[in-house]
Amino acid sequence: MALILSIDTATTTGSVSLARDGKTLQTLVNEQQQDHAAAIVLYVQQIFREQGVTADDLDAIAVSAGPGSYTGLRVGVATAKGLCYAWNKPLLAVSTLQMMAQGALDAVKDTAAWYCPMLDARRQEVFTAIYDASLQPVMEPQALVLEPNSFDAWLAQKKIYFFGNGSPKWATMLPSIDNAEFIPYEMSAVDMAPLAEQLFHQKSFADLAYFSPFYLKGFYFPQKH
């Protein structure tokens, strides 16, 4: 049995969730990205209070580890690492894209299809991957500049569900919708629970001293002229 606190601030929507044995007990969501740093710790306190647990009861802390917003990921990972240090708990690093695939799979329940999460990376670029129903990567996570034929080879093989805040711009480029289906998806730390539980039992813990988010590409600093 494992009691795991999960933190996600990879996008504009941030959330904190508490799960026991992979089953969610409570989740709190913040829609204002600029407030993530302040809201996350307050949400942890609120969940502990309302669930009647303390830090001593926790077995681990999981964090959505990227890709995603550069600033958002730094907030989430720094918060999770700080709590792990303070409470002497192991850190579980969960891929944001795999977390999204878990959520879509739970919603659709189509085990014959593939799942393609997309996070907006500005302009025509997305952070994306393709996962099968066992949540193993068919296409590895990457920063991809979208073109009309970007997924032709994959769509020729199997039905793919596309979702996430980067998927609308892909939908406008797609010349044919054969084997492609677009579904709604809302980011939530709830979707980390099964993955975090699995990592915990595998004892797949991140190194607190050296772990950093999976950015997939460097941060862009605009040049001043």
Image (cartoon, rainbow, N blue to C red):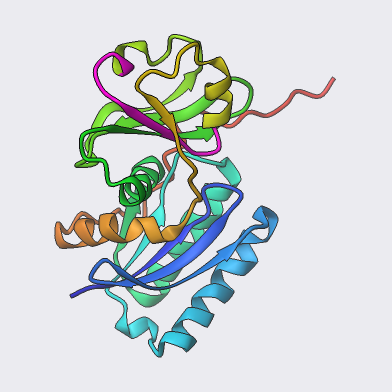
Q: Is residue 19 magenta?
A: no
Please report the residue visible at 46 percent of the width from the left and 55 percent of the height from the top.
77
What is the x, y in percent for residue 59?
27, 74
Q: Nearer the viewer, residue 77 or 19?
A: 19
Judge from the rendering whether residue 105 lies leftward or rightward of residue 44; answer left or right. Answer: left
Query: Relative to the observer, which residue lies in front, 55 or 24?
Result: 24
**Residue 44 placement (x, y as % from top left):** 49, 75
Q: x and y percent of residue 219 in the render?
A: 58, 32
Regarding residue 208, the answer to whether it shows in the image is no
Q: Please state, as top left, top right, bottom left or bottom right, where the C terminus lies in the image.
A: top right
| Residue pictured at 69% horizontal, 55% vertical | 34
Span colored in magenta: 155-166
**Residue 167 to residue 147: above or below:** below
10 up-or-down from 51: above or below: above
* The residue positioned farthest toward the bottom in the image shown: 52
Q: Quadrant of the N terminus?
A: bottom left
Q: Is residue 137 above or below residue 92?
A: above
In the rendering, at what x and y percent does residue 2 appear? 23, 73
The answer to which image quadrant residue 48 occupies is bottom left
Which quarter of the picture shows residue 198?
Answer: bottom left
Residue drawn at 23 percent across, 34 percent down: 132
For residue 67, side relative to residue 223 (left or right): left
Image mark count: 0
Q: Residue at x 20, y 54 (%)?
A: 204
| Residue sticking out furthest to the left | 202
The answer to whether residue 177 is visible is yes
